[in-house]
């Protein structure tokens, strides 16, 4: 077994071990509350996969986490810690909504690419500004991206409350878009093939998210820009000696981060709510950080980690509904344990696993 395959095996075993420990501790907590951990696990999985409505919601959440996971991963490969996906998704989603409001008489096939382009531009600019501060002024991206999350929130509140809110409406949200610009939901797509499934928010954006996974994979590992971004993230001094512009790649990486985060608005606004709403991205950006770290910042790992959190979100909702002693707070605890062991403490058991794998390879 070569070194690359050995490292892949170690990384896989580390992730699986950490997830097992997280769920094992969760099981102990559930048992301490007087409930059966096995029944809770079966309920969790049934809620996520056991019927078509649950599966639809699971993949719907997964779609959002793919976008924000990719948004964090690009920055991480450049040595950046982008915590601004919440604000970037907010501003990108605002652009998506404005396009749908202004061009609602147009065909979806024309509005959809324009919405994608607008979310890339607005979300990308919102990410590139902290990138500029980092590259040109040395400002730490964690501080600036957090600040820009709050600025984005204030902008959205004011626009929705004073500009886009219809007369005589109390809720700070825009009017509903015309149906012509709605992204088809999955039950409508399946109806075309004579297959009946339950209506859920899952829509065609899921396929777009899968395409983004492939495109990001190609971008990071098979393009010159991707190589430069990874070089800057690995050793910026070596990058300078190689003639690579560190500042340009930092700004580029943050622009791509913002554009990817802005795609959350495609799923939430064009595909689900069909209007601009406050907090449509609530928590999705921060969860994307955990998704990317658990997925080792690789598109395939991000897909699996996004699916895991989709399971936890939808299965957790089913669990809190079906099991009396388990409420939403305990579900959040389970999610927190997964983040703790698979993210923050990811290398806790790595030395033991590396030793085990080395012994296995020698045999």
Image (tube, helix red, strand yellow):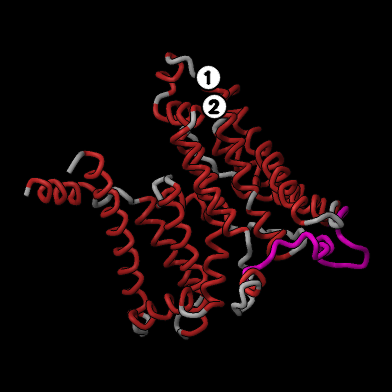
Q: Quickly name the residue at label 2.
A: 249
Q: Is the magenta stretch mostly helix, strand or loop?
A: loop
Q: Name the spot of residue 133 as percent of width and height, x first.
A: 62, 28
Which residue sits at x=43%, y=35%?
Answer: 221
Q: Which mark is residue 188?
A: none
Residue 302: image location, x then y, percent:
45, 52
For mark 1, give the secondary structure. Answer: loop
Report x, y in % for residue 246: 51, 22
Residue 27 shown left or right of residue 131 in the figure: left
Residue 229, can we see it?
yes
* Circle 2 SS class: helix
Identify the residue at image location x=77%, y=51%: 111
Against 74, residue 109 (above or below) is below
Segment tinted magenta in the rendering: 161-186
Q: How many labels does the image show?
A: 2
Q: Does the magenta stretch include residue 171?
A: yes
Q: Residues within 10 Å of mark 2 (few under 14, many from 20)?
A: many
Residue 361 vs 53, above or below: the answer is above
Residue 56, x across and y down, in percent: 56, 71
Extreme-front residue of the structure: 193
Dividing the picture into quadrants, the one containing residue 142 is: top right
Q: In which quarter of the image is the N terminus?
A: top left
In the visual, does 247 lie left or right of 110?
Answer: left
Name the residue: 29% across, 53% down.
12
Task: Tell me if residue 27 is in the magenta stretch.
Answer: no
- For the residues labelled 2 and 1, say whether their Cβ atoms are less than 8 Å apart: yes
For this orientation, the residue located farthest to the right is 167
Inspect this view and state whether residue 319 appears. no
Asked if 97 appears above or below 309 in the picture, the reply is: above
Task: Measure the C-alpha gap from mark 2 to mark 1.
Answer: 6 Å
**Local crowd size for mark 1, using a 10 Å CA cut-off: few (<14), some (14–19), many (≥20):** some
Mark 1 sits on what residue?
245
């Amino acid at each position: 077994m070569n070194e690359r395959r050995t490292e892949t095996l170690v990384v896989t075993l580390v992730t699986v071990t950490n997830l097992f420990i997280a769920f094992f501790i969760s099981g102990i907590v559930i048992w301490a509350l007087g409930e059966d951990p096995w029944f809770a696990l079966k309920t969790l999985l049934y809620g996520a996969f056991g019927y078509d409505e649950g599966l639809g919601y699971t993949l719907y959440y997964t779609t959002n986490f793919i976008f924000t996971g990719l948004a964090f991963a690009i920055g991480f490969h450049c040595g950046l810690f982008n915590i601004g996906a919440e604000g970037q998704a907010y501003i990108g989603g605002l652009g998506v909504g404005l396009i749908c409001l202004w061009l609602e008489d147009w065909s979806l096939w024309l509005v959809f690419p324009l919405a994608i382009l607008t979310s890339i531009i607005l979300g990308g600019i919102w990410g590139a500004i902290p990138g500029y501060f980092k590259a040109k002024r040395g400002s730490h991206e964690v501080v600036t991206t957090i600040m820009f999350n709050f600025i984005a929130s204030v902008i959205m509140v004011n626009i929705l409350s004073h500009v886009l809110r219809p007369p005589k409406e109390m809720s700070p949200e825009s009017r509903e878009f015309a149906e012509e610009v709605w992204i088809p939901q999955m039950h409508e797509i399946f109806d075309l093939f004579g297959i009946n499934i339950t209506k859920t928010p899952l829509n065609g954006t899921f396929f777009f998210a899968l395409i983004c996974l492939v495109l990001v994979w190609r971008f990071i590992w098979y393009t010159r820009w991707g190589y430069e971004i990874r070089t800057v993230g690995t050793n910026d001094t070596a990058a300078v000696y190689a003639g690579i512009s560190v500042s340009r790649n930092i700004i580029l990486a943050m622009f791509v981060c913002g554009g990817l985060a802005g795609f959350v608005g495609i799923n939430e606004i064009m595909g689900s709510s069909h209007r601009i709403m406050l907090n449509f991205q609530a928590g999705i950006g921060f969860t994307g950080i955990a998704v990317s770290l658990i997925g080792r910042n690789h598109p395939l790992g991000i897909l699996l980690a996004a699916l895991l959190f989709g399971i936890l979100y939808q299965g957790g909702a089913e669990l809190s509904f079906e099991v009396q002693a388990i409420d939403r707070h305990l579900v959040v605890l389970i999610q927190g344990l997964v983040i703790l062991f698979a993210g923050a403490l990811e290398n806790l058991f790595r030395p033991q696993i590396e030793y085990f794998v080395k012994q296995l390879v020698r045999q």
